[in-house]
């Protein structure tokens, strides 16, 4: 590659960040790192009607959580700013006017009401080759009429004049040669009545100004590609045009259609990276972070939605992804999102993450559940004992809460049917003579007493576990007892006997 690689993630600040958007950012980031390039965050906020307060900060926070922080952004400007399109407004009109003077665009003065009439008149109305000469624009009006309308500041837009009967070709890094017939492409608005550019003009002008070498975006943008190719050509920048890659869609679990927020709501899983709180309604849309996913797992999941390195490996660190990533291994086909598989990734990441790196997250989960932890050393021991049993971070509350607070409720239904006076007597005796050295010694002493009292050890293990934990779960029961200590174990046995006798 002759030029230094510069790629951009260019989201609109309109709400929560869909996992497809994060994957686009990730692939841009990985490509930049692989080629010692620059990863740019550009905020495309030209549609002021859809702009949502706080959405830009949210996008930045999502990328930071994922560990894919941009090299240049509104918060970290470089030599190619500004990095918000709204701050570049003055740069767009001159290019739209240049297109008009060169015969590649035109003023359109049609009012919303006039457009509505045409939409009713023509089914599937498109403003383009078939209809443009029936509309009120600088192609159908005289020069003096156009000048008068402009002088009177009559509201208008500027539209691209798509050529008739041409084929637009471009090379896509994922799809190879792609071509479109211009007959099916409408005359897109380039500059809106408020003077702000549409995505079509802004993306071309900004990619040129920021010297973007590769443009990666979702497959849903393919229909817009011919307009963008034409603009690069018409503005005289064809040799500077970035290489294109249209990423495959992330599909619903059944493979039928693009995964949407509605699908997540319906099926009970998030599609946003982090919680999104609607500033108008206060409604919360849950994210992967708050559901209890580790950022490393989330990134791992996204990387393998439409890409693989050609091996059977499934668990990748971000550094490994940076080393292995290549555009050649991205699939053209859409990738089904499988939430059960996503949870599997998180479980694997929890298992391989160090206790030290889990500590803060686990402590936060416990605090949210009202459980205060003051002894980090003890917490570390607990995490190490139970992390293999946890799929999501909130699982640590269930799996470890009983180490810090005595059970408030018991799974009595699993104990009472076989509970007897003799078993109560056994546990009273055991509590009086309890000997907690190490887990092996503690288990041997328990079994010896059971045999002495005429019990099979197995029939006493379940009641003992429920006494200490409150339910039928957790690591080895003697590991639990040793961590609780002699006095706490005695106390829990006595409390539970009263419950089981009741």
Image: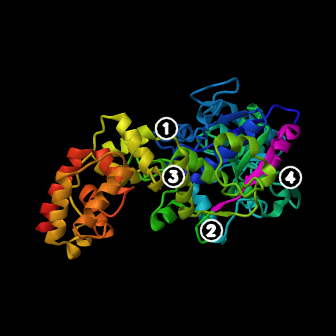
The mark closer to the camera, 4 or 1, is: 1
- The answer to whether residue 480 of the structure is visible from this angle is yes
Q: Report the residue marked by disc 1.
A: 357
The mark closer to the camera, 4 or 2, is: 2
Q: Residue at x 45, y 50 (%)?
A: 387
Q: CA distance from mark 4 to mark 2?
A: 26 Å
Callout 1 secondary element: helix
Indicate left or right for 41 with 331 as reference: left
The image's colour scheme reads rainbow
Q: CA distance from mark 2 to mark 1?
A: 38 Å
Residue 132 vs 366, above or below: the answer is below
Q: Report the residue marked by disc 3.
A: 272
Callout 3 secondary element: loop
| Image quarter of the N terminus | top right
- Whether label 2 touches label 1, CB < 8 Å: no
| Image quarter of the C terminus | bottom left
Q: Report the residue marked by disc 4.
A: 170
Question: Does the segment drawn in magenta span residue 162?
Answer: no
Q: Position of residue 246 (x, y in %)?
A: 74, 53
Q: Earlier in the sequence, mark 3 or mark 1?
A: 3
Q: Report the residue marked by disc 2.
A: 257
- Mark 4, Cα crowd under 10 Å, few <14 / some 14-19 / many 20+, is some
Q: CA distance from mark 3 to mark 1?
A: 24 Å
**Boundaries of the magenta span:** 226-250
- Mark 1, Cα crowd under 10 Å, few <14 / some 14-19 / many 20+, is few
The mark closer to the camera, 3 or 1, is: 1
Indicate left or right for 51 with 190 as reference: left
Q: Which of the pair 241/318 is nearer the observer?
A: 318
Report which quarter residue 226 is drawn in: bottom right
- Mark 3, Cα crowd under 10 Å, few <14 / some 14-19 / many 20+, is many
């Amino acid at each position: 590659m002759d030029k230094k690689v510069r790629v951009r993630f260019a989201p609109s600040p309109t709400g929560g960040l869909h996992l497809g958007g994060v994957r686009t950012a990730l692939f841009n980031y990985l490509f930049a790192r692989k080629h010692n390039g620059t990863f740019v965050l550009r905020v495309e906020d030209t549609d002021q009607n859809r702009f949502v307060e706080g959405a830009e900060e949210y996008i930045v926070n999502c990328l930071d959580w994922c560990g894919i922080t941009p090299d240049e952004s509104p918060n970290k400007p470089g030599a190619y700013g500004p990095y918000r399109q709204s701050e570049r407004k003055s740069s767009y009109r001159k290019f739209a006017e240049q297109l008009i003077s060169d015969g590649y665009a035109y003023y359109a003065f049609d009012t919303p009401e006039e457009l509505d009439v045409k939409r009713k008149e023509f089914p599937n109305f498109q403003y383009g080759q078939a209809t443009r000469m029936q509309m009120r624009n600088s192609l159908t009006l005289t020069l003096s009429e156009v000048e008068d309308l402009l002088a009177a500041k009559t509201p208008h837009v500027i539209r691209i004049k798509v050529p008739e009967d041409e084929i637009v070709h471009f090379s896509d890094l994922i799809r190879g040669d792609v071509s479109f017939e211009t007959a099916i492409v409408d005359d897109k608005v380039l500059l809106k009545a408020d003077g702000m550019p549409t995505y079509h003009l802004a993306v071309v002008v900004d990619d040129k100004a920021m010297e973007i070498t590769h443009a990666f975006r979702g497959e849903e943008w393919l229909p817009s590609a011919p307009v963008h190719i034409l603009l690069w050509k018409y503005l005289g920048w064809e040799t500077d045009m970035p290489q294109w890659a249209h990423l495959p869609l992330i599909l619903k679990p059944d493979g039928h259609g693009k995964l949407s927020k509605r699908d997540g709501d319906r099926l009970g899983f998030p599609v946003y990276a982090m919680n999104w709180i609607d500033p108008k309604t206060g409604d919360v849309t849950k994210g992967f972070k708050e559901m209890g996913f580790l950022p490393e797992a989330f990134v791992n999941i996204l990387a393998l939605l439409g890409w693989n390195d050609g091996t059977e490996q499934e668990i990748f660190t971000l550094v490994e992804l940076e080393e292995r990533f290549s555009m050649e291994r991205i699939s053209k086909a859409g990738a089904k999102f499988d939430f059960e598989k996503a949870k599997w990734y998180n479980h694997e990441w929890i298992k391989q993450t160090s206790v030290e790196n889990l500590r803060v997250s686990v402590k936060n989960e416990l605090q949210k559940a009202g459980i205060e932890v003051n002894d980090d050393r003890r917490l570390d021991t607990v995490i190490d004992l139970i992390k293999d049993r946890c799929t999501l971070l909130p699982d640590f509350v269930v799996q470890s809460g009983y180490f810090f607070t005595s059970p408030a409720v018991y799974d009595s239904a699993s104990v009472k049917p076989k509970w007897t006076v003799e078993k109560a007597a056994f546990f009273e005796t055991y509590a009086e003579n309890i000997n907690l050295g190490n887990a092996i010694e503690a288990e041997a002493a328990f079994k010896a007493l059971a045999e002495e009292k005429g019990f099979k050890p197995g029939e006493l293990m379940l009641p003992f576990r429920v006494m200490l934990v409150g339910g039928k779960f957790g690591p080895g029961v003697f590991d639990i007892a040793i961590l609780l200590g002699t006095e706490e174990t005695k106390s829990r046995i006595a409390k539970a006997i009263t419950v089981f006798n009741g």
